[in-house]
Image: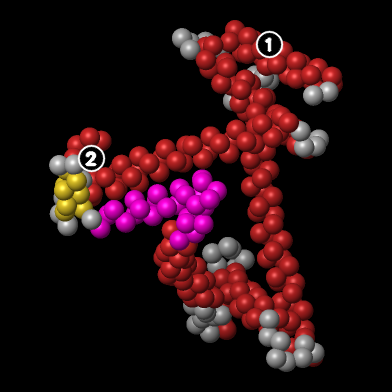
Amino acid sequence: MSRLAVVVFVIVCAAFALSWVLRAGATEGDHAVRDAFLVTLSAFMTLAIMSFMYRDNPYYKFAEHLFVGISAAYWMCVGFWSTIVGNLVPRISEGLSDFFKVPYSGGGLDFDLFFLPYRVFYLIPIILGILLLMRLIPKTGWISRWPLAFIVGTFAGLNLIRYLQSDFIIQISATFVPLFVEWQGFGDFVSRLSLAADGQFIAMLSNLVIFLGVFCGLVYFFFSKEHTGWFGGASRLGIWILMITFGASFGYTVMGRISLLVGRLTFLFRDWLGIISS
């Protein structure tokens, strides 16, 4: 470690201790010291993550590894208590259910092991889970491919039906819109012409844009005919529609990231430094 790195580390530790003391003095309650430590730790972890904007550094790596480790441990605990204890144990053994104090579901094929009845069918996920943990051992890591393939195939099969119903079919049905909404003749349309958002004219215009957008977008992906003439014009309009769609999606993603940044800056300036009020 270079001398500059040691100096920076000492400054960071001193700043952390000073912030902890100041926050403890400004915090009220029986757990002021603990709350001040947690707020200071959260602030310094946030600054460590933001330090990546300068360059890759040990403080960023420490915060990143800490975040990944805590997230993995948290979800492992959630999975154990919700999936294994909450879902598997009540179905596999009455003795284990009594041990973990969860209601036993009962029924199924039983066999006795160590004077406790077990249900055979639900032992399969336990075996697959143990095989999945073989990845932690380098020499037996190849065994984990079999349960992993089973998990990927199961989720792919289940999500295929769900995505077909929720995304694919719904998006297709959403494009089948009437071009003439509540059409009762040209005279009635002119007499009721309005630019209100819930009016007939805006509804017809919106449906027309959806129809032309979908049609021109599909024309762009039709490569069996040369893109010339009116066909080429529709194809170029489809390109613009696709660009606008991708731009809107990218803008939505940027807005989400900006929202996260605003949240962290609000935490730093309000909860940590106390510069701004809530």
The image shows residue 157 at horizontal and vertical percentages of 43, 68
Q: Is residue 3 left or right of residue 230?
A: right
Residue 192 seen anywhere in this rendered image of the structure: no
In depth, the one of 17 and 188 nearer the eye is 17
The image shows residue 178 at horizontal and vertical percentages of 52, 79
Q: Is residue 198 left or right of residue 96?
A: right
According to the picture, the residue beneath numbered tag 2 turns out to be 96
Q: Residue at x 77, y 79 (%)?
A: 236
User: What quarter of the picture does the N terminus occupy?
Assistant: top right
Counting residues from the start of the chain, the first of labels 1 and 2 encountered is 1
Q: CA distance from mark 1 to mark 2?
A: 50 Å
159, above or below 177, in the image: above
Q: Residue furthest top?
A: 25
According to the picture, the residue beneath numbered tag 1 turns out to be 18
Q: Residue at x 50, y 72 (%)?
A: 168
Type of amino acid at the residue the image marks with label 2: Leu
Q: Residue at x 74, y 74 (%)?
A: 239
Question: SS for tag 1?
Answer: helix
Q: Residue furthest front?
A: 139
Question: Which stretch appears magenta?
Answer: 121-146
